[in-house]
Image: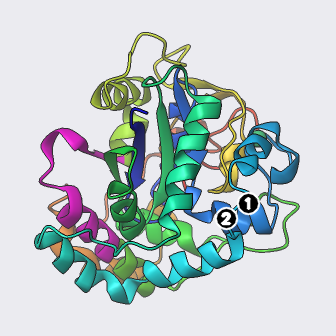
Amino acid sequence: MSPVRVLYLAGSGRSGSTLVTTVLGQLPGFFAAGELRYLWRRGLLENRPCGCGSALADCPLWARVRADLTEADPAGIAARLAARLRLRGLPALLRRQRRGQPPVPGHPDDTHLARLYASIAEHTLPGPSGGVIVDSSKLPPYGALLGSLPGIDLYVLHVVRDPRATAYSWRRRRPLDGRADDQLMSRPPVGKAALLWLVWNTATLRLWGGRGERYLRMRYEDFVADPAGSTARIAGFVGASTEELPFPTPATVRLTPTHSVAGNPSRHRTGLVDVVADTEWLTGLSTRAYAVVTALTGVALSRFGYPLRRPAAPSLAARLSADPVVSSSPATRQEG
Ligand SMILES: [Zn+2]
């Protein structure tokens, strides 16, 4: 069987990867799987909602995939994945990669992981070698593990967002799966959010930055400034056609439901959506928090093209037209 093309969105949390994934899922031959590293716990064990709105167990697509994984033990796989991919193992992981060894040592669970991607491809993608699975798990160690699984042809899209915007977004109170959910997404303090941003973006660069044709870096700010052009660039990067893009206008995207398994609640949005920058952080982030995040991420800011000083907020008129950003559901915002 020919390998499955997987487009892995790597980087830090709250970088806008949910919007990018949902948009890519509209392209012919692309399957927006969401954050597949959470499938075992949040999907198979906790039965959280699929992007299509059904509980995962009731979604016909995931029922077919699940039937291919009857020998897997979701609780065990979820627990062992967390242990194999934890932050404190990162230095050893990077060392193994430098020596040309698999960055994450192999484990019998890897058979089930490889089977998961093959099964998704079989049930969603056209033809034996056509199509792309979009996995927005983001965590660099998980991407490194995927890269050494048999049957996976890995492409890495590194999505970077201004760490001050990311830190502000982390502090917003938000249900994990939309309004009905009583469990909130995690809200680390700004210092921790800044350090995680630095560690995960630096690790992404170290792991894949030198792999010219298999690595594409895109700033979220550039994606929202030209969503149609950016989407075409990503499609071209994975060797897909750029003829049928879901943009009635250059900044409006038509979203149909996806079957993504986890991610920001905004993955449930459908309909015509205006894609514009969410700039609330420019005025909402306190002076102290701005200084903390800037000091902690300073070494990497210029590398990714971000200024040290706080940019001017857009005028009130521009903010009123740009915020809220979603025509179909005014209370949600595009990030993730
Ligand atoms: Zn579904």
Q: Which residue is mark 2?
A: 72
Measuring from the top left, give residue 235's x and y in whole percent: 37, 27
Say if disc 1 is inside 8 Å of ligand 1.
no
Which range of residues does the magenta coloring cover? 198-219
122 falls in the magenta region: no
> Looking at the picture, which amino acid does disc 2 mark?
Ala
Q: Is residue 207 magenta-colored?
A: yes
Q: Which mark is residue 212?
A: none
Q: Is residue 31 visible?
A: yes
- Considering only order in the chain, which callout, 2 or 1, is on the residue closer to the N terminus? 1
Question: Residue 311 at x, y = what percent?
Answer: 31, 58
Quadrant containing the C terminus in the rendered view: bottom right
Residue 280 visible? The answer is no
Q: Residue at x 71, y 39 (%)?
A: 269
Amino acid on which disc 1 is placed: Gly
Neighbourhood count class around disc 2 (C-alpha, 10 Å): few under 14, some 14–19, many 20 upward: some
User: Residue 43, labelled with which disc?
Assistant: 1
**Image vertical order of residue 224 relative to residue 90, above or below:** above
Q: Is residue 306 left or right of residue 325?
A: left
